[in-house]
Image: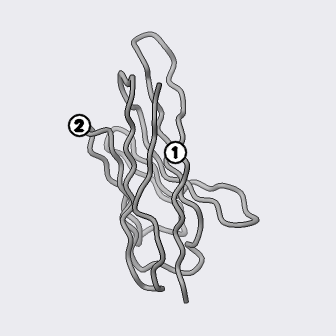
């Protein structure tokens, strides 16, 4: 019913930039929030950044370097990543909290992830 697709990952040198995109589509009534998570090898998945009703929050490790933004009309969220570090290397996942119709609780939908690799 809902598809979440990420794009924009890749290989970049330390200090470089990447922009991730995530689009949600399908039978969507509204999207309450969208967020980016990441999971590095051997580590737990962690919240990177989230946006809801214009409010944003970031993990301490990315504050001042990453910026999350959203295009509500396109059900799309972006993550601009600057000054990348090797420790940012991970699979980045997009999540959308979606309401399918009025009166139904929202549910979380996840993308398949996109690999970001930062070389030193």
User: Which residue appears farthest toward the left when viewing the image?
Assistant: 73
Q: Are marks 2 and 1 in contact (CB under 8 Å)?
A: no
User: Which residue appears farthest toward the top when viewing the image?
Assistant: 103
Residue 10 picture location, percent across and down: 46, 71
Report the residue at 71% width, 57% height from top: 44
Residue 33 picture location, percent across and down: 42, 38
Which quadrant is the C terminus positioned in?
bottom right
Label 2 vs 1, first from the N-terminus: 2
Q: Is residue 25 above or below residue 20?
A: above
Report the residue at 52% width, 69% height from top: 116
Which residue is denoted by mark 1 in the rendering? 111
- Quadrant in which residue 45 is drawn: bottom right
Q: Is residue 5 left or right of residue 88?
A: left
Q: Nearer the viewer, residue 21 or 65?
A: 21
Dot 2: element: helix
Q: What is the crowding at mark 1: few (fewer than 14 residues within 10 Å), some, or many (at least 20)? A: many
User: Which residue appears farthest toward the right when viewing the image?
Assistant: 42
Point out which mark residue 73 bears: 2
Residue 80 picture location, percent across and down: 36, 65
Q: Is residue 21 above or below residue 90?
A: above
Dot 1: element: loop
Foreground disc of the pair 2, 1: 1
Q: What is the crowding at mark 2: few (fewer than 14 residues within 10 Å), some, or many (at least 20)? A: few
Q: Is residue 120 above or below residue 56?
A: below
């Amino acid at each position: 019913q809902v598809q979440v697709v990420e794009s924009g990952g890749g290989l970049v040198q330390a200090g470089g930039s990447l922009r991730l995109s995530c689009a949600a589509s399908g039978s969507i009534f509204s999207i309450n929030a969208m967020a980016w998570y990441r999971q590095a090898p051997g580590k737990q998945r962690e919240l990177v950044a989230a946006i809801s009703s214009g409010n944003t929050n970031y993990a301490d490790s990315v504050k001042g370097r990453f910026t999350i933004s959203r295009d509500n009309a396109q059900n799309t969220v972006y993550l601009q990543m600057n000054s990348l570090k090797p420790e940012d290397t991970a699979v980045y996942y997009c999540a959308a909290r979606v309401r399918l119709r009025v009166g139904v609780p929202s549910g979380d939908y996840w993308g398949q992830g996109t690999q970001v690799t930062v070389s030193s």
